Image (cartoon, grey):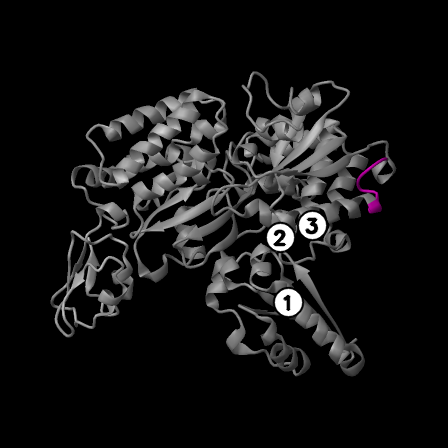
């Protein structure tokens, strides 16, 4: 063949939501209609791939002609005929639809280990995974390594659990291996629930075989023969691709009895949870698999000692397992050297919020927030000032602009008052109110509390009531001190990690943005002009043209004035809906 043409279409959740499946179908139809192989003596295939990372550019399409790649952004099905005719048939890329410099800058500073296959191979094709070295690590572990050798390699790599706590993975596996039991389990936690977090989901959709391979290796290392991947039923694409990947593994002999011709057996299935946030906590997750209500238990023993069905269990999250094959094939020392002394390897983050380049990223441990937000993320959208970044979801903390040089690792984030969490990173700018943002995150943890322990069930409720009063202009002297006291008690006395970390957003914003709380309480003013009850809308006499646009949309008939004369807002009638503010094209309405 003179040429080999490969078309890769993003069909992760973002890609599918933007029409990726229609784009893929359009390319496949164009290939069939043209019969390009017979006409031009060229081999052309179009295939689905997982998340490419730069989600705000979806649908992303790569066209590779003899390995030379051109990437298109925001592709719709009706764009396909022109791309196919001009680029594939005639050899002239459609320049105005290709990605720009920001796309390459987004990827340049990253180092992809876990995400190395996402966006490159078809996640529903086991042969595509095998072609890039898939299951070589499992074969090596089962055929030529003892459990001790596997555990030692993971310990040497300094891989820490990517689910948030950062417990050394090798030590967890070693503890489970040393316990003698007739039955042991390997469980993958894919119950990702943080707002703005989509790391694990993208891996399950884009590279499910890497997760399965990591779990097989863990089974060999801990002498376990049964595994579960726990994920939400509403993650339908993840569930579909995981189940298909597992079926393919059974057909290839990578799961089931006598794997690779040895006496090692390992069986795996997907368990679909009902969506409870608390089931991201290990013990609650395991109770859910057992058919019980997903509620945490007191940690009188580790899960590696007494976990699922009271048997020794290793439970790690999606990203942790996906790292395992890379470590065994490239070496523990290689992986360790990617990160810091205390935290080996890379970390996947979902970058969202008020940042130019939103999407899925992977960086070495020790990368600074400044590099992530301004080099990879492209800075703050609209040219506004960076205010802070919430890391770790509702259980994490907010790090302010003054700490932009903070390095991303477990110890440094803890010192700054935050946690790694599973990797959600929400960027905030000058227009965000920190009190209101904190209330939003606490609403999530409070509503998702299982209610088993009093500090979490009642304590978070009282904190939320105080925050609600403050944002409505009814804050009182002593509220700040009461929030701090409640936060310390909840952190110290809660039963599980959800309760222990629930006060983090409050305590971290009180630490760095105390002045905003004081303005809400003492001045009855929201500095960011976000909290509705603390906003006053006024019309500038110097700017107002008297066009009447604001008057027409006001639902309370609170605006007075005649045409072509400056208008005025009757504060006694104003309901502070902001409709007038949005309607004024001259920017004469201000909110203070």
What secondary structure is marked by label 1?
helix
- Residue placed under numbered mark 1 in the picture: 22
Tag nearer the camera, 2 or 3: 3
Residue drawn at the location 20% of the way across and 37% of the way down: 521
Q: Is residue 320 left or right of residue 542?
A: right
Give the overall secondary structure of the magenta segment: loop
Mark drawn on residue 102: none
- Residue placed under numbered mark 3 in the picture: 241
Residue 556 is situated, as x and y percent measured from the top left of the image, at: 24, 57
Identify whether 497 is placed above or below 427.
above
- The disc, 2 or 1, on the residue closer to the chain's N-terminal end is 1
Residue 198 is situated, as x and y percent measured from the top left of the image, at: 54, 48
Q: Which residues are magenta?
A: 251-257
Spatial CA span between label 1 and label 3 = 18 Å
Location of the N terminus by quadrant is bottom right
- Residue placed under numbered mark 2 in the picture: 116
Q: Is residue 256 magenta?
A: yes
**Which residue is the extreme one toward the top?**
300
- The disc, 2 or 3, on the residue closer to the chain's N-terminal end is 2
Residue 344 is situated, as x and y percent measured from the top left of the image, at: 55, 38
Pick whichever, 157 or 431, lies toward us. Answer: 431
- The disc, 1 or 3, on the residue closer to the chain's N-terminal end is 1
Local packing at callout 3 (Cα closer than 10 Å; few below 14, some 14-19, many 20+) is: many
Spatial CA span between label 2 and label 3 = 18 Å
Local packing at callout 1 (Cα closer than 10 Å; few below 14, some 14-19, many 20+) is: some
Does the CB distance between marks 2 and 1 fall below 8 Å?
Answer: no
Residue drawn at the location 76% of the way across and 82% of the way down: 40
Tag nearer the camera, 2 or 1: 1
Identify whether 101 is placed above or below 300.
below
Q: Is residue 5 left or right of residue 96?
A: right
What secondary structure is marked by label 2?
loop
What secondary structure is marked by label 3?
helix
């Amino acid at each position: 063949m003179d040429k080999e043409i490969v078309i890769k279409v993003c069909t992760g959740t973002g890609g599918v939501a933007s029409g990726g499946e229609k784009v893929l179908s359009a390319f496949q139809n164009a290939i069939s209609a043209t019969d390009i192989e017979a006409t031009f003596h060229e081999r052309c295939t179009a295939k689905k791939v997982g998340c490419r990372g730069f989600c705000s550019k979806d649908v992303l399409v790569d066209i590779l002609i003899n390995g030379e790649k051109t990437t298109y952004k925001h592709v719709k099905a009706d764009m396909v005929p022109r791309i196919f005719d001009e680029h594939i048939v005639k050899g002239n890329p459609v320049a105005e639809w290709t990605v720009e410099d920001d796309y390459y800058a987004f990827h340049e500073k990253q180092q992809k280990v876990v995400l190395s296959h996402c966006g490159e191979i078809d996640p529903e094709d086991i042969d595509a995974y095998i072609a890039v070295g898939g299951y070589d690590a499992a074969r090596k572990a089962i055929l030529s390594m003892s459990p001790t050798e596997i555990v030692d390699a993971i310990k040497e790599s300094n891989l820490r659990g990517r689910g948030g706590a950062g417990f050394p993975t090798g030590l967890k596996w070693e503890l489970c291996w040393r316990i003698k039991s007739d039955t042991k389990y390997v469980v993958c936690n894919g119950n990702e629930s943080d707002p703005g977090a989509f790391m694990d989901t993208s891996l399950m959709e884009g590279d499910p075989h890497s997760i399965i391979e990591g779990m097989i290796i863990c089974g060999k290392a801990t002498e376990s023969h049964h595994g579960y991947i726990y994920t939400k039923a509403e993650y339908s694409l993840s569930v579909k691709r995981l189940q298909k990947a597992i079926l393919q593994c059974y057909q290839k002999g990578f799961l089931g009895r006598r794997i690779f011709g040895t006496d090692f057996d390992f069986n795996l299935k997907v368990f679909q949870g009902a969506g409870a946030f608390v089931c991201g906590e290990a013990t609650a997750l395991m109770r859910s698999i057992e058919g019980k209500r997903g509620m945490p238990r007191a940690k009188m023993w580790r899960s590696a000692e007494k976990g699922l069905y009271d048997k020794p269990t290793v439970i790690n999250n999606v990203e942790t397992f996906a790292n395992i094959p890379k470590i065994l094939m490239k070496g523990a020392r290689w992986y360790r050297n990617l990160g810091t002394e205390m935290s080996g390897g890379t970390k996947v983050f979902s970058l969202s919020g008020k940042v130019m380049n939103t999407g899925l990223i992977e960086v070495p441990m020790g990368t600074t927030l400044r590099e992530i937000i301004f080099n990879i993320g492209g800075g703050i959208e609209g040219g506004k000032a960076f205010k802070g970044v919430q890391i770790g979801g509702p259980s994490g903390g907010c790090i302010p602009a003054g700490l932009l040089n903070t390095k991303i690792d477990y110890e440094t984030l803890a010192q700054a008052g935050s946690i790694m969490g599973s990797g959600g990173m929400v960027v905030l700018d000058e227009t965000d109110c920190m009190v209101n943002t904190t209330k939003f995150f606490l609403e999530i943890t409070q509503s998702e509390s299982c209610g088993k322990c009093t500090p979490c069930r009642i304590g978070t409720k009282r904190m939320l009531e105080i925050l609600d009063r403050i944002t409505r202009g009814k804050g009182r002297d002593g509220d700040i001190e009461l929030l701090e006291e409640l936060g310390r008690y909840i952190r110290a006395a809660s039963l599980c990690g959800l309760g222990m970390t629930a006060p983090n957003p409050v305590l971290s914003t009180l630490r760095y943005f105390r002045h905003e709380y004081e303005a809400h309480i003492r001045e009855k003013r929201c500095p960011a002009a976000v909290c509705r009850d603390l906003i006053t809308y006024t019309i500038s006499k110097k700017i107002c043209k008297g066009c009447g646009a604001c008057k027409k949309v006001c639902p309370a008939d609170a605006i007075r004035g005649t045409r072509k004369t400056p208008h005025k807002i009757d504060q006694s009638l104003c309901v502070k809906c902001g409709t007038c503010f949005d309607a004024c094209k001259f920017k004469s309405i201000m909110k203070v």
